[in-house]
Amino acid sequence: MPKDHGIGASPTRREDVRFLTGRGKYTDDIALHGQTYAVFARSQVANGVIKSIDTSEAEAMPGVLAVFTGEDFVDVGGNPAGWQINSRDGQPMKEPKRPVLAHGKVRHVGDAYAAVIAETEEQARDAAEAIVAEIDEEPAVVDMGKALADGAPLVHDEIGTNQCFDWGWIEDNRAATDEAIKNAPHVTTLELVNNRLVPNAMEPRASTADYDPGTGEYTLYTTSQNPHLTRLLISAFVLGIPENKLKVVAPDVGGGFGSKIYHYGEEALVLAAAKKIGRPVRWTASRSESFLTDAHGRDHVTKIELACEKDGTFIAFRTETMANVGAYLSNFSTATPTFLHGTLMAGNYAVPNVYVNVKAVFTNTAPVDAYRGAGRPEATYSLERVIDMAARELGIDPLEIRRKNFVQPDQFPFTSAAGLEYDTGNYGALVDKLEEMIDRDGFEARRKASEKNGKLRGLGVNTYIEACGIAPSNLVGVLGSRVGLYDAATVRVNATGNIAVMVGAHSHGQGHETAFPQVVADMLGIDENSVEIVHGDTSKIPFGMGTYGSRSLAVCGSAVVRATEKVINKGKKIAAHMLEASEADIEFTDGQFSVAGTDKSVGFGEVALKAYIPHDFPLEDLEPGLEETAFYDPANFTYPAGAYACEVEVDPETGKVTVCSFAAADDFGNVINPMIVEGQVHGGLAQGIGQALIEGTVYDENGQLLSGTYMDYAMPRADDFPMFKVDHSCQTPCTHNPLGVKGCGEAGAIGSPPAIVNGVIDALQRGGIDVTHIDMPLSPGRVWQAINGAQ
Amino acid sequence: MYNFDLIRPSTLEEAVKALGQDEAQALGGGQTLIPTLKQRLAMPETLVSLSGIDAIKGVCVHDDGRLSIGGGTTHATVAREAAAHYPGLAALAASIGDPAVRARGTIGGSLANNDPSACYPAAALGSGATIVTNAREIAADDYFQGMFTTALDDGEIITEVRFPVPEAAAYQKFEQPASRFALVGVFVARYADGVRVAVTGASEEGVFRWSEAEAALSSNFAADALKDLSVPADGMIGDLHGTPDYRAHLVKVLTGRAVAAAS
């Protein structure tokens, strides 16, 4: 019977009451007294030399309070990369400065070179249009291959190359992998593109800054997934505002998908402007600005080779990837194509040889960084496409070839050929569950029914593994991370027994306000409605690292557990005092502190009250109050895994693909709120299927974004999907965090693209059309082109 | 958006007068113009909203049997009120955009804008409709003059569109995945004196009639009648969503499907 409260129950999301009734409070809803508005002047060209910027007309326009250009920020720092990658030759990556406003050169369409502050947004916009910038357009580099060619125009002249790094993983395995591939009985080779995506959070980025000359304190309200990191970057690297004088508040945030992890120049600009004019300054991105300037996702071009025995036993994977980082290094842009991608290139498989080469490339396009899945979707897509192709070439069932090569349950903990230690898993059980869900035996009948209607039906399958719960600081430090990736929580028990939990994670759709109280309430034996979550305000919460990489529950949730354990231990001390017993004899069960072996007990609420009315405390031994903080740094990544399948129909006359069914069997370890988990998988599937079928970011050769509005950038909608079948009953709990949880936020986006593409190829092949690969998105035009080319 | 003056007259005469001013522009349902203004891509001094003119709204059947639709009638109203008289047209109206678009967008606005991917031009041309304005009557064959270009003079207002009701008709739209406008849309209508086939979304010249298909279907109203025909890719739109070849191919596929749906 499903639980009705605590861990494992599915209470509805309490935050939805305000979201669904229009009472959410987003950055753009915050109206400060005397607030002014910022509008940016942005480059219309992808690569250009700024000859002059004349702001005089703009400054004289009605309502204008200040105009800034790159010149105003030459003496402040730049927005840094958070992760240093070293090239195969040992040289550190090239790391050009990313200024608050472009200075000297503009490097992508949308690159801001000036900003106007005015009384109203319309006035600021009018004045921004009146800025006269003389910018000499130069040839742009958009295509990564061309960017790496000799004589290519340079995005950053000062580094003398468009290559940020040339990374090998694991370099010591290179020779053995080359040798294994050379001698293998069968090698399947596939070149593929992992298409660039625009994140398209429902809420555009927005920032409002306030400066108090009375105290010298700044407050920044901003759309952030991790306010402490934003504060750290602004304080330590960009503006030098002391951390103790800067409060960063990320209130309700309408989706991030990675794009709001990073610090952006607009945040620094409004802070500097607020101080200069002595009034609050607000900026809210238009949707067009979001398209042009939010950090985009994916954008890899990969050649992958799979060497195997004739019976399908894997011998080696070798990949060469070009990863687009865009015009500037966004904060985690260098980690995404390397340690979140290359380390996953062994997949779920006990393959002995893996070698990954990634060249990161600067281009005159928007910066590219982590987007839901971040590196792991790229790894999974490459692996699962080439495995499917090999299975077809060898005449082996696509699920069987995977089963044959899985790491087996008795092999855990298992060190993969790509260097990660998988703590636990049971991949065969996931495939068994998947087969239960999809009625494979009935496929042929369904295929024939489709055929009767002139449609080609295919079955696409794949498995995946991801590294989540990001991340063990000691490991990532060795690998080049410049930050720690622990998290933190404070559990404050109020005198009347209810609780505020201040967390470092940030909820922008994940349901933390519902799920975290389930954990605390379960541990304390109290009603979860008496537990409140506080997040997003650096002046209220402990220094945590925010939400991304499916880390909130695995890392911050573990900190919540540790802090709650400390509360229980403190409660035992108080109870021992109240019950005149030894602390060692106090047991805590179901909300009651009791003396072992007696009927003497005291309730959690009484202990809480006593903590704040300590009239008779022995103060040398017992502090008043009941509030504890814990920092939790994970011992390892967590490793969710899954097996996915879909059936698709292809209309061979139009190329249109319809997803008829989609089944996802995931192992997330233990599950706190199954309903929220299911919702997270649904959202991930929607994004992954969107990537596979319709989402495509297209720049022309001059660096103009052709897919810059919803008229041309296709977002998936509910009617693009079937009802999803999801299951998370295969659970191998994480072995190293106290909840045994693994994370579920990215799984759907990681696991679904290869299933869809494999399904479409299967449909075409069964229909007698010899197409072996189509690059995403598999839009109707592309699929028709492939069919047409094959016939 | 830039500042503008808004006038909302309640009679056609007032609207015509208001549109006589410099830099005045008519505003129908605003489903194209408002987004254009928001992006600061247009700078009218004055917008003359036609939404207050009741005389140009509504659906009725003329004495001669033609279906008359007021220029200010929304897609939602057409979808609802034309269904009994001209189901093919009502179904087309019901397939435009989403409920919000259908609740605001008007037939007159769509025809005046003549977006090369809009649905209504296919119905008007495919039905041999008459576009009635405050000044004159224009046959659909003379009205559409290329992408975003029509026979309308400045300040001329579409008051009514008269559709001869066919024996059978159907519209087939293949949606562009992002905008869900017609990547290609084909409207086929069979009348006693012949078949009309109008294609939207495909051509750089905007909506057009596929005369070879009309001839073939007039003698045999079956998808089979099209099998030896093909549409040249020359002059077809090529963009992110489809090449000229693809669009030319879709014209034939969708014409066949429209015939099957109408039969």
Image (spheres, rainbow, N blue to C red):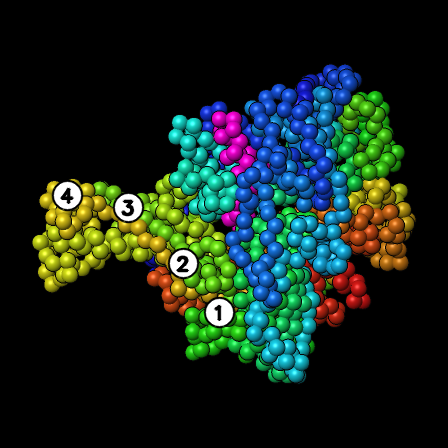
Q: Residue at x 23, y 54 (%)?
A: A568
**In front: B151, or A328?**
A328
Circle 4 Cα neighbour tier, 10 Å, few/some/many (<14 / 14–19 / ≥20): some
Among the two numbered marks 3 and 4 on one chain, the one whose residue lies closer to the N terminus: 3
Q: Residue at x 68, y 52 (%)?
A: A363
Residue B200 place in picture, x, y as percent: 79, 44
**In front: A157, or A82?**
A157
Instruction: Name the amino acid type tagged 2.
Output: Ala
The tag on residue A492 is: 3
Among the two numbered marks 4 and 1 on one chain, the one whose residue lies closer to the N terminus: 1
Assign a secondary structure to mark 3: strand
Q: Quadrant of the N terminus of chain A?
A: bottom left
Q: Which residue is mark 2?
A: A554
Disc 4: host chain: A
Q: Give how far apart the Cα atoms at labels 3 and 4 are.
A: 17 Å
Instruction: Name the amino acid type tagged 4.
Output: Pro
Assign a secondary structure to mark 4: loop
The tag on residue A614 is: 4
Disc 1: host chain: A
Assign a secondary structure to mark 1: loop
Q: Give how far apart the Cα atoms at labels 2 and 4 are.
A: 36 Å
Q: Against B17, is A602 above or below?
A: below
Bounds of the magenta span?
Answer: A257-285
Q: Give how far apart the Cα atoms at labels 4 and 1 are.
A: 50 Å
**In front: A447, or A434?**
A434
Q: Give how far apart the Cα atoms at labels 3 and 1 are.
A: 37 Å
Callouts 2 and 1 on one subunit: yes
Choose top left, top right, bottom left or bottom right for residue B153. top right
Disc 3: host chain: A
Q: Which residue is mark 1?
A: A420
